[in-house]
Image: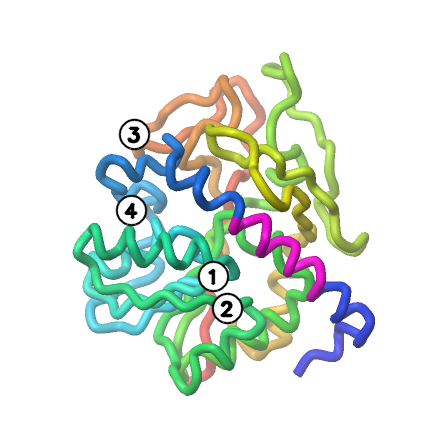
Amino acid sequence: MSDSTEPAAAADHSHKMRTNEANWDARTPIHLASRFYGLDEDPDPARWFAPFEWADMGELPGRDVLHLQCHLGTETLAFAQRGARATGLDLSGAAVTAARDIAAGAGLDVDYVHANVYDAAEALGDRRFDLIYTGKGALCYLPDLPRWAETVAGLLRPGGRLYIVEFHPLLNSFGPTPAPGDTSELLLRHDYLGGRGAVLRDATHTYTDGPPVEGETDCYEWMHGLDEVVNALIGAGLGIERLREYDELPWPRWPEMERTASGWWRLPDASPRIPHLFALLASARS
C-alpha cells in the first residue's frame, strides 16, 4: 500500500470526502431534473463519449466493466448497451439510488455499488474486472492518487485495462466557469499542478441548470497535473499504452464554442488550440 498519506492527513481527507458525499447527495435531485442530463427524454448514453473512446477500449461484449465515480450512471449505461457486464460505483448514496432507477427505466442490467472509491476493493469483494473506466470530472475529487492507482490495480484482472478520459488539468486551471463578460480571452485562474492540498469550492450552484443546492454546499477538490496521474499509475505497476489530448468537450464550456461533426464542441479556429480532455489507457501485467 502507498505510504503517501500520513494518519492525520488520512483523517482530514476522510472528513473532506464525507463533506463531498453530502454535497453530491444534495446535487443529485437537481441533476435529475436538469436539462444538462436530459433524463426526462432519452438519456442517450453515447453522447458522453468521444468517437475515439470505443476504439481505445476495444471489444466489450461479455467483458466485466467497472465505472468508478459514476454519479447518475449516464455513461455506465453505454457499457451495458454494448454487451458488457457493467458495474458502477459512486460515493453518493442518492446518486446510486437514482442510477439504479435510470437503468431500470432504460431496461438495462447494471449493478450499482455505493462506496468511496478508496473502499472499492472491500465493497466489491473478490470481483475483478477486464476494464475500469473513470473520468470527466472524477480525479479532482480524489486527494491521494497513488492510493487510488493501487486500488485500481488491485481490481483489474491480469492483462486488464484502465481507461481514463478526464478534463485536462489545463482546462481546470481556467476555472469552472468563464468570468462575466469574458468571451475573448482564456485566463489562468487556478493551479495546473497539485501540491497545495484541498481547494474549498462553494457548490451552492452546481454545473447544471436548476435551483441552488439545498443542504451541504461546501465541496473539496484536489488539483492533479498530468505527471501526477501518470506517475501514480506507473508506481502501482500499470503500463501506459496510450495518451491522447483532445480539443473538444461534450457541451459548450464557453459561449463562443462551435459544434463539430462529432456533435461535441470546440473553440473557434481563431482561438488558441488547447486540450480540453486527456485520455489515458493503462494495463495490468498479464
Depth check: give the residue in front, 256 or 35. Answer: 35
Report if the CB atoms under discs 3 and 2 are less than 8 Å apart: no
Q: Which mark is residue 115?
A: 2
* 21 vs 171, nearest the viewer: 21
Q: Which residue is nearer to you in this view: 138 or 227?
A: 138
Judge depth for marks 3 and 2 and give the one in front: 2
Find numbered disc 4 in the image and state the secondary structure of the residue it sits on.
Answer: helix
Q: Amino acid at mark 1?
A: Asp
In the rendered view, does 45 fall on the left or right side of 144? left
Distance from Cα at disc 1 to Cα at disc 3: 32 Å
Label 4, label 1: how far apart the Cα atoms are: 17 Å
Instruction: Kindly report the distance in space between the C-alpha atoms of the residues bearing marks 4 and 2.
Output: 23 Å
Of pointers 4 and 2, the one earlier in the residue sequence: 4
Q: If you read the primary sequence from the N terminus, does the residue marked by circle 1 or circle 3 appear first?
A: 1
Pointer 3 residue: 261
Q: Quadrant of residue 101?
A: bottom left
Split into 4 quadrants, where in the image is the C terminus?
Answer: bottom left
**Magenta-highlighted stretch: main secondary structure?**
helix
Residue 178 position by quadrant: top right
Q: Which residue is mark 1?
A: 90
**At x 46% / y 78%, what residue is drawn?**
155
Quadrant position of residue 21: bottom right
Boundaries of the magenta span: 14-25
N-terminal label among 3 and 2: 2
Q: Earlier in the sequence, mark 4 or mark 1?
A: 4
Which residue is denoted by mark 4 in the rendering? 45
Q: Amino acid at mark 4?
A: Pro
Helix, strand, or loop for circle 1? strand
Q: Identify which amino acid the numbered label 2 is placed on.
A: Ala
Residue type at numbered disc 3 = Ala
The N terminus, quarter of image: bottom right
